[in-house]
Image (cartoon, helix red, strand yellow):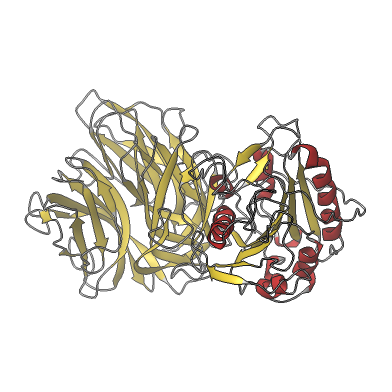
Amino acid sequence: MRKLVLALAIGMLVASSAVTAAPGKAMAASAGVKVVIVVGATQGATAAYRADAESAAAEFAKFSTADRPVNVTKVYSPSATWSAVSAAARGANILLYLGHGSGYPNPYLSYEQPNGDNGMGLNTPTGGSDNVTQYYGENYMAQLGLAPNAVVLLNHLCYASGNNEGGAGNPSLAVAETHVDGYASGFIRGGAKAVLAEGMNDIEYYIDGLFTSHTTIDAMWKANPWFHNHVTAWWATRPLPGYVSQIDPDLDHPASDGEVYYRSMVAIATLLTDDVISSPVLPWTAQTGTYYPIAPFRVVDTRGYGTGPIGTLSSGGPYTFAVVGSSPVPKGAIAITGNLTVTDQTALGWVYVGPQISSAPGPSTINFLRGDNRANGITVPLSPQGTLDAWYGAVPGASTDIVIDVTGYFMPNTDGDGYVQYGPHRILDTRVGNGLTGKFYSSQPRAIRVAGVAGLPDKGIVAVAGNVTVVSPTYLGYVYISPTAAVPPTSSTINFPANDIRANNFVVPIGPDGSISAAYWTSVPASVELIIDISGYYTAGGGAQYHTLNPARILDSRVPVGLTGPIPAGQAQTLQITGAGGVDAGAVALNANLTVTQQTYLGWVGAGPAISLDTIFSNVNFPVNDNRANGVTVPLTTDGKLQLMYGAPAGQNIQLVLDVCGYFK
């Protein structure tokens, strides 16, 4: 049995009434402190745990005031399904869980189960019984979407504080540390800044301390009356770098089976208790700002090679990633430009990134096949908390890793750089000697002149928006577009297999000499042809400002929305952009995501203010039977229209989808 018998019961207090929260709704600043209490299915102990939870709710209620209400949402067995817990927990400042714990290592399996270990023991999806437990592990806890500076309290769990199951004896210190880090990791991926596990004693002290101590979480934890002063501390190995793990064994009073590990904390030790209860999740609102380019910086790599919490994304749930605070992007940024890469996906599907996700999104950002590393340039709004959410759409049980590289950000001011319409125009095509002659070879970066080329100004450009297309690579690899040459590259712009034609959009700063650089990176000697089309540029002083939009679908020719499909090859289609999806009249350029599907023949799609079969630019290249997407930053006509063209032999057709993310005006 994966439960811990209570050594000290919490005294019964007057129960507080449950406050029902609408699933996925963000708290406004005036909503006060959001507390979520979860009681899992723990068989014969469930009634006692519910009583403890009611006592905790009453303790929280003592600190509720008119100026700062404490809103308690209760999700108790037999209704504690994962759907109910995940909906209630989003935006919680404090999450309390009482129930079974299932950690690793354990006596049952010789390997760790990220979908079952280090999380909650809840009801089955249909609920209805205290006696049937279904475990939801670290990969589920990573979907919680807690408030900034959130604290998770784990009470009476096996494994979470370092302990074994009751009666199993005392683990070694190394095993206890593995238990502690493992159990905290999912909650930290879900947004927690501190995870406190109290195995034997009640948690009234922690509740009181969060509201009254006005100190660091570390000082509060060590002031506990059950503090044993036998602390072992180490840098947390599993969660976000910068977290400190601590364990405080009761060496002087071991339990009957020798257990001593009943108190632990994994936290940003400098976290202030006042910040925990004053950091609500603010609702997303559209904003306007100007651009600040930066050298590409990797802000998310779920494989563990960069910053940010590690761990794959499971299909069918939202994940939240901090952008502000873990990168050069400053507090207050409203949107970023960058590159999203998917890798190690176990099933074909799509990933969507956006400012706040509470349920399966309508738009998508990138589509992909299984086993195909694929990238898409993004210009996407951030949440008011400086975070970005991601959702993997695939068959149940599928997983993927993602990488996000930031190339710039927008601030809500007029001090940064503005966007200027241009083209689209082709400035590089190595196949015909446009810009550069000859193929790119692996590990040999080359500079590409931008300033003064093809009608671009010879000075004043700070960054360009464009599209890079790779043609006939002789070996799988990636190309990195950057201000200056870098070998090996520190980031990537487009990933591809051998013998493919593939495109990706980008926004990249211009080097001091008016050029950008491209480098092809692979593990063996290889070559590739490169094409670059420019669709706009940023300039200091002047230009259009960026207006953020919560991504929305304004074209789906399958439905039909915007255009009626299937769309025939070789015939320009005109789409009214202004007035759709929140795009205002007077917009000079659109930022969106273009997806092709159900194509009957390989080819390309181009988007611009005017387009024909003679137009020399494209946005998406594709074979048959492969849904592909690419971001577009593209000028509009003066009356707010956009033309799209499918380049393929006559008689072929395609379906197109366009999700708008923002616009320039």
Q: Nearer the viewer, residue 350 or 573?
A: 350
Q: Residue at x 51, y 43 (%)?
A: 113
Residue 61 picture location, percent across and down = 85, 59
Residue 619 placement, left or right of 662:
left
Q: Quadrant of residue 80?
A: top right
Q: Nearer the viewer, residue 546 or 236?
A: 236
Residue 158 picture location, percent across and down = 67, 50
Residue 632 picture location, percent across and down = 35, 49
Q: Does residue 282 sit above or below 512 in this rendering? A: above
Q: Residue at x 30, y 28 (%)?
A: 625
Q: Quadrant of residue 213?
A: bottom right
Q: Residue furthest top?
A: 651
Residue 121 placement, left or right of 374:
right
Q: Residue at x 24, y 28 (%)?
A: 601
Q: Does residue 583 sit above or below 300 in this rendering? A: above
Q: Nearer the viewer, residue 382 or 441?
A: 441
Residue 654 picture location, percent across and down = 32, 29
Residue 645 visible (yes or no): yes
Q: Does residue 217 sit above or below 350 in this rendering? A: below
